[in-house]
Image: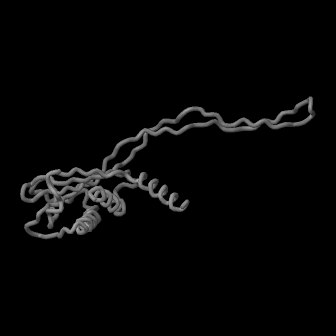
Amino acid sequence: MKKIISLIAVSIWLASCSTPAYVQQDESIRLSDYKTYMWIDTRANENDQSARATAYADIPVRNEVNKQLRNFGWQEVTENPDVLVSYEVLVERSRETRSDPIYSQAFTRSYYNPYTRRWSTMYYPSQFQGYQVYDTPVRDGTVTITLVDSKTDKNIWQGWSTERLSGTRLSSEQVEGTVQRIFAKNK
């Protein structure tokens, strides 16, 4: 019984550590009515042939989204899809204010007690001095997945999640985990 309770507590703790995912869906539409989808590329304009800054995320995002949509029973097609699928990756740079507590150095002092004729040691613990406040640069990566009805050109579903980046860009594992969290909100 103790093992079960501890397992439940650990799973709740792990679930609380993950970054949240958000989903907006058109309430008048049921996703189960759709069966096929096709990927679309988002460009600044029709003649824009430049490489996108988020091209590094193409393969992990597409593979994970394809896997999740296949789990829904959808099939990828090249003509006449029910739904158009697109994604965007945004890496945002900002500054975060942090504060760390500062403590004094603990020390000891030896003294002679003439009444007991002994040397004794007095310990002085560290004291709280205040906070050191500083700004540090941070990067947040947001993955947004959008499903658009191909006949009406209306957004029928959009999911996104933001995650703090440890490096300069989203890794494949971070992208896959983010996409999984987004689609887990839809179940």
Horizontally, residue 138 falls left or right of residue 133, namely left
The residue sitting at 49% across, 38% down in the picture is: 99
* Image quarter of residue 137: top left
Horizontally, residue 50 falls left or right of residue 79, namely right
Q: Position of residue 2 (x, y in %)?
A: 55, 60
The residue sitting at 81% across, 37% down in the picture is: 121
Horizontally, residue 122 falls left or right of residue 32, namely right
Vertical relation: 157 (above or below) 112? below
Vertical relation: 105 (above or below) 36? above
The residue sitting at 59% across, 32% down in the picture is: 129
Depth check: give the residue in front, 54 or 50.
54
Q: Position of residue 83 (x, y in %)?
A: 13, 61
Depth check: give the residue in front, 30 or 48.
30
Vertical relation: 5 (above or below) 117? below
Depth check: give the residue in front, 167 or 22.
22
Q: Position of residue 76 (x, y in %)?
A: 17, 69
**Type of colouring:** one colour
Q: Position of residue 118 (x, y in %)?
A: 90, 36
Quadrant location, the N terminus: bottom right
Quadrant location, the C terminus: bottom left
